[in-house]
Image (cartoon, rainbow, N blue to C red):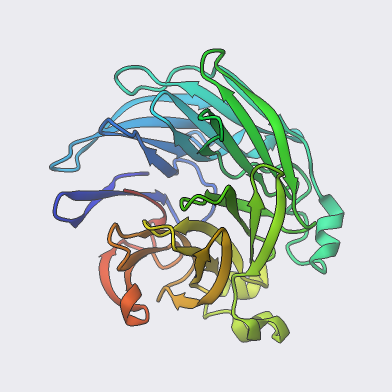
Amino acid sequence: NIAHVIPLAAGMLVAVGTYSRLAGHVPGTLGRGVRHPSKSVIYACQEMDADGESNAVTAISFDECTGVLTAINTVKLPGGVACHVDTDGEFLFAACYMPTGSTGVVHMLPLAEDGSVQPICDTFEATEASGKAGDDARGGSQAGRQDTSHPHMACLYRTSDGGMGVLVPDLGGDVVYKLAVSKQDRKMRLVGSAKLAVGTGPRHCVVDTQGANVVYVIGELTNTIDVVDIESMTSVQRVSTLPAETAGQQPSEYLSDNPFFLEKVGQSCCSAVKLSPDGKKLYGSNRGHDSLTVCSVDGGRLKFEGCLSTRGRTPRDFFVGPNAKYLLALNQDSGTIATLSIDDDGRKVPLFEMNAAAVSVIALTP
């Protein structure tokens, strides 16, 4: 369900993606989306359609003044649980988290002049999985999470020769794939990969915007951020997303009052990672610790500065305001969106609330 468009500031709207109830990967859910760079169109992942049997991507037009949403079309995708999309305005790239057998997929789909999504023109297949080695590296925590490939994001970036590429963090394989894109041939081609420490579970990434040829990759299963050199596809730095004192603590000592992570997961798990508009700050979300990591960025290297409480449970996604003075934190298991003032030590005032018994907020598209 992406039935929520809310005013953020004068002349600015944001679309909120939700799960239809407080559970992951349920029928009828519409999650992470991306806006067309020049049209009033949003592309959203539909993890499962109403029959619970297939996943899809949906093009949705919206009125710039009223925020009224109108579905344009939906294209079903092979694979399972479409979890992330990105676009350059000509093509849409969709990562599917659940594999077909042991193969994870990322699809490339053309976009029509009206913004509608056209049938798949190419598919990248991934098969790497860390399996039991990943479980052992984490001391048995989150066992089974890496039994198969799990592509979790399709992140577009501009290559050094002016072309376009896609970076794909694969949680199951502890790898980030580097794909070259040929628009003329409408194809993707594997040109490199970064193998991260076993057990990391890379989930999302964001490319540096200050001139360093690096990408910041957040590890869901180890609460870390790797700085990966895009040319060599090697990790050149790793920082923790949690305060240093948590390293010697039991999960029950540092997790917030969050029953799901306390009782079922047993640790904090990262989710989104994003840069401030000026590229000088990096933020990452900690689900379970229920905070946002804050790192300063200098020359493609990170310095951990601390964490901001999101004043809610399970911050699955967030948005950095255009003036870099506030953040919007989407607390999935609280059903709330909170504003955090960056200049005032995370002071929060309510912005928007949903009925937590009915939906859980998971993604925001500006």
State how many labels appear.
Answer: 0
In the image, 90: left or right of 183? left
Q: Is residue 144 left or right of residue 27?
A: right
Q: Which quarter of the figure has residue 250?
A: bottom right
- The quadrant holding residue 70 is top left
Residue 78 shows in this picture: no
- The part of the image, by quadrant, that contains residue 353 is bottom left
Where residue 296 appears, x then y in whole percent? 49, 69
Placement of 121 over or under 180, stated as above or below: above
Q: Residue at x 37, y 78 (%)?
A: 346
**Residue shown at 13%/42% (left/top)?**
65
Q: Position of residue 153 (x, y in %)?
A: 56, 43
Q: Position of residue 158 (x, y in %)?
A: 51, 36
Q: Give the residue at x 40% y 31%.
A: 58
Nearer to us in this view, 205 or 27: 205
Q: Is residue 63 left or right of residue 156?
A: left
Residue occupying the far top of the picture? 185
Q: Please, is residue 69 above or below residue 241 in the view?
A: above
In this view, 126 is above or below 264: above
Q: Position of residue 183 (x, y in %)?
A: 51, 18
Q: Is residue 227 visible?
A: yes
Q: Residue at x 61, y 52 (%)?
A: 203
* Quarter that holds the N terminus: top left
